[in-house]
Image (tube, grey):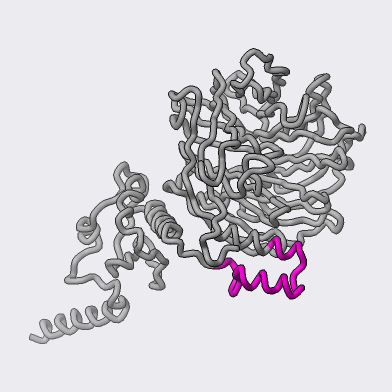
Amino acid sequence: MKRNNWRSKEKEGWSNRRQTYLPNHYRRPNHCSFTERCEQEEPWNSLNAGTSNSGSSSEVCHSSPVPELPGFYYDPEKNRYFRLLPGHNNYNPLTKESLQYKEMECKRLKLLEEEEMQKKKTSRAGLNSSLVLRKRQLGLLSSTNYCRLVHELKVNCMQRRKVEIRSPDSSVTGTNNFKLIVADTACERIFTVNDVEHGGCKYGIINLSGLGKDSLTVEMYDNLYFTNRKVNSVCWASLTHQDSHVLLCLMGIAETPGCASLLPASLFSNSNPGDQPGMLCSFKISTAWSCAWCLNPQADNCFSTGLMRRVLVTNAMTGHRQTFGTSSDVLAQQFATQTPVLYNGCRSGEVFSIDIRQRSRRGHSWKAVRLFHDSAVTSVRLLQAEYYLMAADMAGKIKLWDLRAVKCVKQYEGHHNEHATLPLQINEEEGLVTAVGQDCYTRIWSLQDAHLLRMIPSPHPSSRDSIPSVVFSSRLGGSQGVPGLLMAVRQDLYHFSYNSANPYCP
């Protein structure tokens, strides 16, 4: 009897101790194991997570304040913990990656629902059109600041509309996914790189002249060939006239070397089929990560390619080359327009400039300006006065550098990037900075004070192969064009236009 009493007291003590250690919200109910509860849970994976949550997009997803337990996750809807299964098996209903994907999808659907319901909020507290106009009338705002604030209000009111893409060859319309879009100087045309289903890339040019306030229709012209190699970088080139060609950097595969190709834009126009396309040339190079065209008269017809541990500057007319050795791969480039100086961003995080007029290239004395990031630099952009340079890296950092003082003066928070080469766009006329993150969100900041103005979710579920490519301009379609943002994702093209129907919008 004593032994039985001792055992009963021992069980009671262990029971009380377990209840003291585990709070009620994650204590095992009815002595049921976590494995049994996991088997009762309806399985799902990252492939159908987007569709399974489409009917409950209004649910709010947020991280729970309860403590984390190794090997378990907390479901706020069921108020319980469930076991995370190993990620190496073929069928895995619960993994950390799938849970993160589910949370991201829930957040994206909620933001899309708010946009459709026009739940717009001003980017700054108390900022509205009447207040901005009143301050302008009282002389409290200069014309520059007034225009900047008006653009902030308009950006916050942009609404998404799908663009109809027409093509002379109806069989190619809407069959290939957009990978990259790049606008010319006047924003009249957009060069597109599309992924082909059986591998490789296909090129095209979209004419934006039909993009108006009433009609959202554009014409797309494809060429009759494609490449089976990956396109690493694209820029417009002014060889015979303004934006006459397109410069592409193609990655080599197997025994086929990489190349830099100059394609005449007339290849994609059906207006004058009898005209000759002009110069079409290709330069064999090693793996090229980036390219840039020089518009300075002192380096006329020259372009640069960023290679593995070197920079190659080539004259497209004569074929003459200059080589500059570097200690790291060059992932981003841009030429200055006032001087023949090339700015480069490297995998090591270094940003440096090259004056291509110099002859001596010993050591690193030819590097005029040297800046440093903590991660690989994926994009460099010069401001118009060329006193400032903006750079983005693979750590998600966007920094504005003063080239005269050689220091960082502003940092734009919120960008998401881990390993992708993502472009950066600056619109000084509107005072805006635009970048698409690896999380498929398009973010717009104020150039002046680095304030995040808007975060636009992708219309499609987030994935590595569906990162949107965007173009922002106040004159899409030319000098008389419409302002807004163009977003290419998957097989669709969207226009985010300014809308004056919103009470916050001037």
Q: Position of residue 305 (x, y in %)?
A: 73, 32
Is 456 on the left or on the right of 45, as rendered?
A: right
Q: In this view, does 454 lie to the left or right of 76?
A: right
156 to 297, vertically: above or below: below
Tell me if residue 156 is in the magenta stretch: no
Q: In this view, does 271 lie above or below 379?
A: above
* Position in image of residue 118 (x %, y %): 45, 61
- Front-most of residues 87 and 25: 25
Q: Is residue 100 visible?
A: no
The image shows residue 276 at horizontal and vertical percentages of: 68, 14
Q: In this view, does 128 lie above or below 197?
A: below
Residue 249: percent from left, percent from top? 66, 29
- Residue 257 is left or right of residue 383, and the answer is left
In front: 300, or 372? Answer: 300
Instruction: Point out the image quarter for the N terminus.
Output: bottom left
Residue depicted at 10% across the width and 82% down the height: 4
Image quadrant assignment for residue 184: top right
Name the foreground residue: 376 vs 260: 260
Residue 436 visible to an observer of this rendering: yes
Q: Is residue 146 magenta?
A: yes
Q: For the view shown, which residue lies furthest in the left direction?
A: 1
Residue located 66% across and 22% down the image: 266
Residue stretch rendered in magenta on the structure: 122-148
Left or right of 77 in this view: 260: right
Number of labelled discs? 0
Q: Which of the image's four quarters has the C terminus? A: bottom right
Residue 211 falls in image quadrant: top right
